[in-house]
Amino acid sequence: MSLLTLLAFLGACAAAAATGALFSPGSWYRGLDKPAWTPPDWLFPVAWTLLYLAIAVAAWRVAYSGAAVVPLALAVWACQIALNAIWTPVFFGLRRLRGALVILAFLWLAVLATLVCFLAADVLAGLLIVPYLAWLSYAAALNLSVWRRNPDERAIQPSEQVLD
Amino acid sequence: MSLLTLLAFLGACAAAAATGALFSPGSWYRGLDKPAWTPPDWLFPVAWTLLYLAIAVAAWRVAYSGAAVVPLALAVWACQIALNAIWTPVFFGLRRLRGALVILAFLWLAVLATLVCFLAADVLAGLLIVPYLAWLSYAAALNLSVWRRNPDERAIQPSEQVLD
């Protein structure tokens, strides 16, 4: 099990994680009407760091499992990390609450497919995906609630914006 | 070679491609000082459609090649698609010309690693990555030139913006 492979999976997660720093919540997010069960801000980076580590290690284990499902398993893993990378820019960058929810729905399905494939290849790898799917379910409920509580929130069109 | 696997690789590309529609160039991009060798706007979606198809088929071939390098090859492929997905939001969404160039540098290296791994697994798959690396080299030169020609261009901080 090459360490380079683990580093490459971690690199994919780092690219997705970078959006969290680039598109930070800020005052706009604080001003949104959010449900009482919204987690505190500090929990997001902590949770995501652990989840990214878990899914990178899971992919690494599956990649060397020798199971017949490996090609499909790694393809759906790639699909979920690409979807994961675009959610933050759409939510915090464009402020498209509904568009972000659509992406989250695709992401949730891709992670469910990853979970099923990983379980077939390596049970521990599959279990490492479970917290991720659970967190995404919570995030989807939160995204849905925020969208419904802020019906007048308008999407940003970067192309139409005036600087300053 | 399962068609589902090809669809999952195409799904990863579709997620990255979606950023092109979500973060469209618009008047800000038109107003930038660009070099004479900037391609016409219509060429971008045409080129990217062909490139995404090529890299999805390449990954599909490699996934079933049975080569020892498959785990590393698919891990670097996942890394490059995640980096690919965040370039557009950073360039067109945040208008961070330098930040986008940094991402493009990492993306270029990840695609070079993908090319090397793919060539070792399947020559045709490796060749399918060559146009992508060539296009990224061109895109990096363009990104660099636009950054240097527009030194006063300021990055957007979505969190600090006022809606309308």
Image: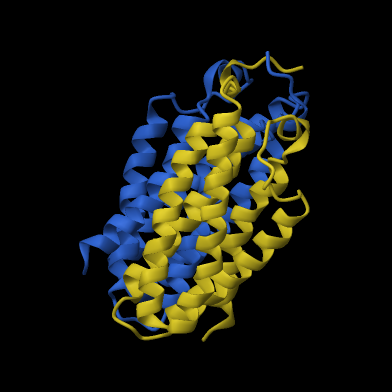
Chain colours: A yellow, B blue
Q: Is residue B63 above or below residue A112?
A: below
- Report whether residue A96 is seen: no
Seen in the image, is B53 located left or right of residue B101?
Answer: left
Q: Is residue B102 above or below residue A5?
A: above
Seen in the image, is A79 located left or right of residue B97?
Answer: left
Q: Which quadrant of the figure has residue A43?
A: bottom right
Residue that appears at 43% across and 47% down? A105
Q: Position of residue A61 (x, y in %)?
A: 49, 81
Residue that appears at 72% across and 41% down? A24
Q: Is residue B11 above or below residue A2?
A: above
**In the foreground, A123 or A40:** A40
Q: Position of residue A56 (x, y in %)?
A: 56, 71
The image shows a total of numbered marks equal to 0
**In the foreground, A105 or B117:** A105
Q: Quadrant of the C terminus of chain A?
A: top right
Q: Position of residue A129 (x, y in %)?
A: 50, 70
**In the foreground, B113 or A42:** A42
Q: Which quadrant of the figure has residue B66?
A: bottom left
- Report whether residue A99 is seen: yes
Q: Which quadrant of the figure has residue A55?
A: bottom right
